[in-house]
Image (cartoon, rainbow, N blue to C red):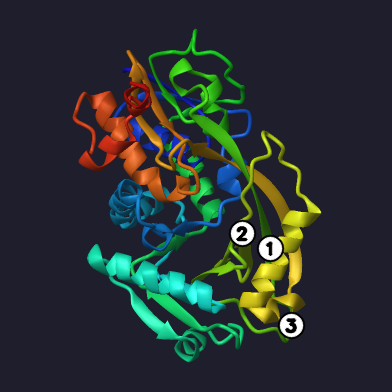
């Protein structure tokens, strides 16, 4: 049985480990705390369309390719024993002022040209879809094809599936690749750039804070679907969970490997969310946390061979959960000696050397 070492036990590393072990590989995952890190703190949005913007067509194509894989991916995980909590309710993007409304119109026109389904709503129609929205919401876009997943249920499901398939976990921090057994997949998130010279300077940490809230007795319930907005130029998302909690994000700024929660970050999230969904000011604040996204130099991840026996699966920015299925498929194809999915071509690590020429 061929050996595989996966460096990193977040959503990408666990997905690769599960899929590879299901195809007969003997897999070892190296991570001091598998199933935690940035993946544990993600919002869980699977929303390539509402993340789309002109100039990032390759990211949209890759995200949509992975989104199409998600229903089967979730079903297969559930069949291993734990349901990952996939939600089909779509995304509502709202605008609070004329500038944001103009941006929504531009986004709707762009997506329509690409053939994507979007529904344009007035402020009144948006509030009818989600009654807790602020009276100041001017317009909205309803994107029915977007999904969401409970990130923590997903990680629990992946760890369970790996255990079922005989994956070994070593609670270690890998600092060099020498001594690892078999082929190697690098999926250590923001730390991956330290593990291979081809990724040095190409993957960096991008800090983000999240909050978890719970409605108290007498409060309006959270929205039924993911709600996104721009508030004074800052993105905000509200993602409901089946247990009644509401996840708020997403601050994002350069802070190196600092994972402390700041007053500024919490204030920005609460103020922005209150502008969108005012009743949450009466909710209970359950959790504050900060994590480090693995940001690439161009928002496209690095998915592909780095050298003999070493494969990159990193730099997914804010799309790690979304792109887990297609990344795992690409890694397994590489392990099997098959061509990678066509949509992954733009994510090749070799693009760095091509840019330097």
Of the image marks 2 and 1, the number of the one nearer the N terminus: 2
Q: Position of residue 175 (x, y in %)?
A: 58, 16
For label 3, the residue is 217
Q: CA distance from mark 2 to mark 1?
A: 6 Å
According to the picture, the residue beneath numbered tag 1 turns out to be 269
Name above or below for residue 226 compared with residue 287: below
Q: Residue at x 69, y 81 (%)?
A: 279
Q: Examine the image and state in which quarter residue 143 appears.
A: bottom left
| Residue positioned 41% across, 60% down in the render | 47
Q: Nearer the viewer, residue 138 or 282?
A: 138
Dot 3 crowding, Cα within 10 Å, few <14, some 14–19, many 20+: few
Q: Nearer the viewer, mark 3 or mark 2?
A: 2
Q: For the N terminus, which image quadrant?
A: top left
Quadrant into which the C terminus falls: top left
Mark 1 lies on a secondary structure that is helix
How far apart, in angstroms, are the residues tagged by discs 1 and 3?
Answer: 23 Å
Please determine whether, in this image, residue 173 is positioned above or below residue 23: above
Q: Residue at 45% of width from left, 74% of height from top?
A: 102
Q: How many marks?
A: 3
Judge depth for marks 1 and 3 and give the one in front: 1
Q: Residues within 10 Å of mark 1 (few under 14, many from 20)?
A: many
Query: Contact (CB < 8 A) between labels 2 and 1?
Result: yes
* Residue pointed to by mark 2: 249
The x, y position of residue 324, in whole percent, is: 40, 44
- Residue 328 at what x, y percent from top left? 35, 38
187 vs 272, nearest the viewer: 272
């Amino acid at each position: 049985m061929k050996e595989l070492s996966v460096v990193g036990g977040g959503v990408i590393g666990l997905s690769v480990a599960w899929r590879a072990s299901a195809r007969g590989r003997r897999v070892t995952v190296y991570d001091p705390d598998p199933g935690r890190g940035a993946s544990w703190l993600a919002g869980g949005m699977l929303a390539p369309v509402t993340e789309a913007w002109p100039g990032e067509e390759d990211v949209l194509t890759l995200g949509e390719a992975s989104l199409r894989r998600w229903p089967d991916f979730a079903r297969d995980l559930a069949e291993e024993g734990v349901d990952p909590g996939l939600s089909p309710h779509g995304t509502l993007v709202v605008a609070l002022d004329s500038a944001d409304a103009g941006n929504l119109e531009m986004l709707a026109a762009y997506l329509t040209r690409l053939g994507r389904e979007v529904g344009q709503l007035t402020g009144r129609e948006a509030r009818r879809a989600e009654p807790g929205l602020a009276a100041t919401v001017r317009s909205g876009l309803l994107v029915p094809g977007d999904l969401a997943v409970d990130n923590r249920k997903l990680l629990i499901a992946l760890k369970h599936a790996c255990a079922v398939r005989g994956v070994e976990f070593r609670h270690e921090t890998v600092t060099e690749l020498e001594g690892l057994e078999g082929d190697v997949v690098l999926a250590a998130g923001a730390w991956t750039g330290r593990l291979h010279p081809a990724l040095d300077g190409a993957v960096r940490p991008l800090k983000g804070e999240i909050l978890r809230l719970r409605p108290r007795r007498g409060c309006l319930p959270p929205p039924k679907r993911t709600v996104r907005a721009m508030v004074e130029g800052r993105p905000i998302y509200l993602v409901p969970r089946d247990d009644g909690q509401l996840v708020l994000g997403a601050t994002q700024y350069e802070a190196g490997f600092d994972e402390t929660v700041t007053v500024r970050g919490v204030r920005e999230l609460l103020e922005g969310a209150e502008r969108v969904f005012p009743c949450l000011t009466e909710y209970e604040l359950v959790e504050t946390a900060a994590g480090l996204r693995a940001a690439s130099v161009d928002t496209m991840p690095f998915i592909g061979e780095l050298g003999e026996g070493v494969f990159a699966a990193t730099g997914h920015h804010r799309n790690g959960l979304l792109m887990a299925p297609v990344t795992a498929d690409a890694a397994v194809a590489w392990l099997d000696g098959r061509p990678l999915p066509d949509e992954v071509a733009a994510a090749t690590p070799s693009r760095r050397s091509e840019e330097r020429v």
